[in-house]
């Protein structure tokens, strides 16, 4: 089963992808995480990515497509994978379809006020990248690494506004693309993580039955 998770920044697709990937034995591939790893490693791609990400802009298609396809070629995802944060433009979606078979695109959405509130509480571990919600933490340390969690630079309010503009202009058109290919499944992301996960799991069970 190869899935795409779509949705605006802050809708919760990353946390959901981690959870669903674990429950279904799928490989979780997040292009955002891959880019943050490149930034931490100080690579050429990382230096370029830092500028785009911190301005709230999408990376150029050519670069991100090459990075993702190379990851897929080298992956040993037997049960399939979840693409989290890719595709983000129509061109990326069309390129992806030339190389792999996507079974479903799960589109999560929530009102902008909800997204902004969630992002303001979002923290990550600068070492392992694990995500946290600030008010649900008993201390401000990563439970895996013991280091202080931080707010992503691109989660600062001004940058989030630019990211939302990028989302509406470049990413939203993909929803129609997946609708036209019959792969779109829309899920209301304005719910608890448990609630959203339960809905997505129900959908995946139906998909599994339909594919057998
Ligand atoms: P979120 O899911 O919170 O919006 P991500 O961690 O997925 O954020 O991505 C962070 C940033 O990385 C994006 O705002 C963008 O600059 C860059 N990025 C990630 N994936 C892509 C992509 N497929 N195409 C272009 N840029 C990307």
Image (tube, rainbow, N blue to C red):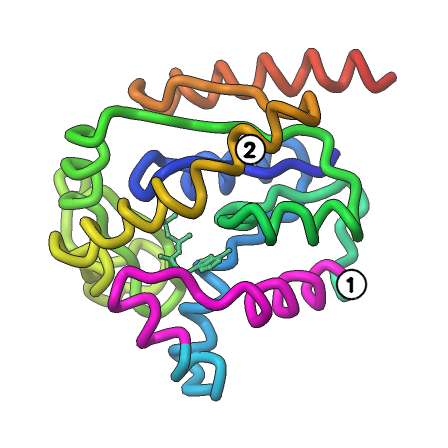
Tell me the residue at 59%/46% (across/down).
Answer: 83
**5 in magenta:** no
Kind of element beneath mark 1:
helix
How far across and how far down the image is residue 32, in percent?
Answer: 44, 59
Residue toward you, 53 or 135: 53
Q: Nearer the viewer, residue 90 or 24?
A: 90
| Tag count | 2
Residue at 51%, 31% (x, y): give it. 175
The single residue placed furthest to the right in the displayed view is 212
State the residue in front, 171 or 203. 171
Give the image location of residue 17, x and y in percent. 51, 39
Judging by the rendered image, the residue that carries numbered circle 1 is 73
Which quadrant of the view contains residue 22? top right
What is the x, y in percent for residue 47? Answer: 39, 84
Question: Is 46 rendered above or below residue 111?
Answer: below
Q: Is the residue at mark 1 in contact range of ligand 1, meaning its CB lies under 8 Å from it?
A: no
Which residue position is annotated with label 2? 20
* Residues rendered magenta in the picture: 49-73
Q: Note whether 116 is above or below 111 in the view shown.
A: below
Q: Quadrant of residue 189?
A: top left
x, y percent for residue 183: 66, 25
- Residue 116 as seen in the image, left or right of residue 86: left
Residue 132 horizontal side relative to residue 99, left or right: left
**Type of secondary structure dominating the magenta stretch:** helix
- Tell me the quadrant of the picture where the N terminus can be found: top right
- Mark 2 C-beta to ligand 1 under 8 Å: no
**SS at circle 2:** helix
Q: Which numbered dot is residue 106?
A: none
Q: Quadrant of ligand 1?
A: bottom left
Does residue 74 sit above or below 155 in this rendering?
below
Look at the numbered discs 2 and 1 and tell me whether their residues touch, using CB distance below 8 Å: no
């Amino acid at each position: 089963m190869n899935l795409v998770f779509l949705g605006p920044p802050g809708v919760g697709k990353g946390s959901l992808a981690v959870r669903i990937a674990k429950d279904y034995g799928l490989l979780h591939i997040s292009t955002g995480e891959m880019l943050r790893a490149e930034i931490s490693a100080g690579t050429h791609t990382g230096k370029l990515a830092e500028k785009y990400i911190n301005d709230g802009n999408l990376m150029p298609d050519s670069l991100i497509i090459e990075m993702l396809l190379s990851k897929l070629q080298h992956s040993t995802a037997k049960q399939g994978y979840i693409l989290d944060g890719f595709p983000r433009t129509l061109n990326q979606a069309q390129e992806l379809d030339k190389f792999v078979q996507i079974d479903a695109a799960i589109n999560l959405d929530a009102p902008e006020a909800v997204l902004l509130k969630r992002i303001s509480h979002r923290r990550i571990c600068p070492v392992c990248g694990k995500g946290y919600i600030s008010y649900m933490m008993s201390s401000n340390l990563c439970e895996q690494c013991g280091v202080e969690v931080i707010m992503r630079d691109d989660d600062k309010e001004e940058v989030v506004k630019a990211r939302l503009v990028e989302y509406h202009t470049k990413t939203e058109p993909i929803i129609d693309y997946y609708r036209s290919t019959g792969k779109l499944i829309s899920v209301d992301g304005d719910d608890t993580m448990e609630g959203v996960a339960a809905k997505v799991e129900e959908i995946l069970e139906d998909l599994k039955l339909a594919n057998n």
